[in-house]
Amino acid sequence: MAENKTLPTYFCRNCENPLALGEDLISKKFVGASGPAFMFSHAMNVVVGPKIGRKLITGSYVVADVMCSKCGETLGWKYVETFDLKQRIWKGENLVGAIDHALKVFDKMAHSIGPRLYSCCNCRNHVGLHDDIISKAFQGRTGRAFLFSHAMNIVVGPKEDRHLLTGLHTVADISCADCNEPLGWKYERAYETSQKYKEGKFIFEKAKIVKEDW
């Protein structure tokens, strides 16, 4: 991952795809498998993989690997869940390796966890697990929408402020990593206290996903 010295933007070292903004940098004091790593509150133009359990220096976590959406380079991981209360502050954050462009750190998991999957309506790429549904009572652009705690095999776009039915939020659109079909969005920030529970969660438009093998 390379840093632009003029603009506060971080790029994939392999293909120069923009990945993160300097304003979203939380810490430079993390350690990845290949050396120093940076913690970001948001990453864009990355593919989020399926979640897996992983033992790290600070404890056990459920994480999801992140890859560059342009060249497929493995960049780091996203914290999905932690089992140590002291580490809860990192839940939902993105850790992106900062040293070399050939990060071959993590096992590539092609399988999905759990038997009940949701897939992209266009190409049948697996994008979510039924067990990760928080609510089916949301409203999207096309009608009914589901709130998920995690999404996989999707590309997260740049964040932007958007006025939704429940108020102002900072969101990032999500699309299928295989066919680029728009699927919904990720909540990055909620400005009203009652909406804070959405932060780090994903909205899938019901019309954009289908049940797979169940």
Image (tube, rainbow, N blue to C red):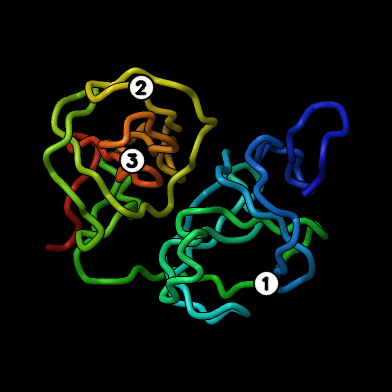
Quote the CA–CA distance across marks 1 and 3.
Answer: 33 Å
Q: Which residue is mark 3?
A: 196
Residue drawn at x 45%, y 22% is 161
Q: Which residue is mark 1?
A: 105
Left or right: residue 55 versus residue 147 is right
Foreground: 111 or 6? 6
Say which amino acid is labelled 2: Leu
Circle 1 or circle 3, nearest the eye:
3
Q: Secondary structure at mark 1?
A: loop
Quote the CA–CA distance across marks 2 and 3.
Answer: 11 Å
Q: Indicate the position of residue 25 as horizontal and vertical percent values.
A: 67, 44
Residue drawn at x 86%, y 27% is 6
Say which quadrant the C terminus sits in: bottom left
Foreground: 146 or 170? 170
Q: Indicate the position of residue 182 as horizontal and vertical percent values.
A: 37, 31
Which badge, 2 or 3, is on the more N-terminal residue?
2
Q: Say how many tags the image has.
A: 3
Q: Which mark is residue 3?
A: none
Say which amino acid is labelled 3: Lys
The crowding category of the residue bearing disc 2, from other C-alpha atoms within 10 Å (few below 14, some 14 to 19, many at least 20), is some
Circle 2 or circle 1, nearest the eye:
2
Q: Quadrant of residue 8?
A: top right
Say which amino acid is labelled 1: Val
Q: Secondary structure at mark 3?
A: helix
The crowding category of the residue bearing disc 3, from other C-alpha atoms within 10 Å (few below 14, some 14 to 19, many at least 20), is some
Residue drawn at x 45%, y 32% is 172
Considering every residue shown, the one lying at the far top of the view is: 163
Left or right: residue 108 versus residue 32 is left
Quote the CA–CA distance across marks 2 and 1.
Answer: 38 Å
Which badge, 1 or 3, is on the more N-terminal residue?
1
Q: Which residue is mark 2?
A: 168
Image: 125 above or below 166:
below
